[in-house]
Amino acid sequence: MTIQVNLKPETEAHLIAQATMQGISVDRYLELLIERHLATSAESEWKLILDQLGRSPSLAKALPLSDEAISRESIYQEREEQQL
């Protein structure tokens, strides 16, 4: 895909300088910046969703699991019985 972007001369000079310092082409440098930004955006979105879930009133009403319910034996009991 080809995208054309009109940049201010000082922005273009800064991009060229950064790419040169990295030892890569300006195209590759921009690609890396965009990929990093998109990954960070996705991560931030997940953090926001998890934070909203953690603050959910319905979650606050949920009873905690007992120690037995989260014990290793309880988790793997059904699987072990199927193997016998």
Image (cartoon, helix red, strand yellow):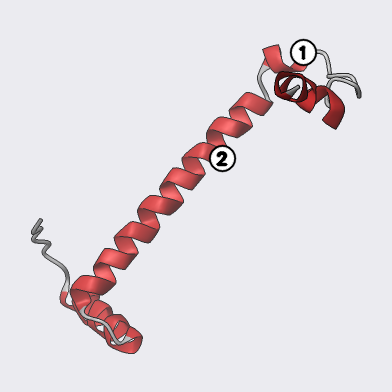
- The residue singled out by tag 2 in the image is 47
Q: Residue at x 54, y 31 (%)?
A: 49
x and y percent of residue 31 in the render? 26, 65
Relative placement, left or right, of 38 versus 19 is right
Q: Residue at x 32, y 82 (%)?
A: 18
Q: Looking at the picture, which amino acid does disc 1 mark?
A: Ala
Closer to the N terminus: mark 2 or mark 1?
A: 2
* In this view, 69 is above or below 31: above
Quadrant of the rendered structure where residue 16 is?
bottom left
Q: Residue at x 86, y 27 (%)?
A: 73
* Residue 74, numbered label: none
Q: Residue at x 21, y 80 (%)?
A: 25
| Mark 2, secondary structure of its residue | helix
Relative placement, left or right, of 28 versus 66 is left
Task: Out of 5 and 62, give the one closest to the viewer.
Answer: 62
The crowding category of the residue bearing disc 1, from other C-alpha atoms within 10 Å (few below 14, some 14 to 19, many at least 20), is few
* In this view, 27 is above or below 5: below
Where the N terminus falls, by quadrant?
A: bottom left
- The residue singled out by tag 1 in the image is 62
Task: Out of 66 and 37, give the one closest to the viewer.
Answer: 66
x and y percent of residue 70 in the render? 83, 26
* In this view, 68 is above or below 61: below
x and y percent of residue 72 in the render? 84, 31
Whether residue 71 is visible: no
Count of marks overlaid on the render: 2
Q: In the rendered structure, are the residues bearing label 2 and label 1 in contact, judged by CB atoms less than 8 Å apart?
A: no
| Mark 1, secondary structure of its residue | loop
Relative placement, left or right, of 84 versus 7 is right
Residue reaching furthest right? 67
Foreground: disc 2 or disc 1: 1
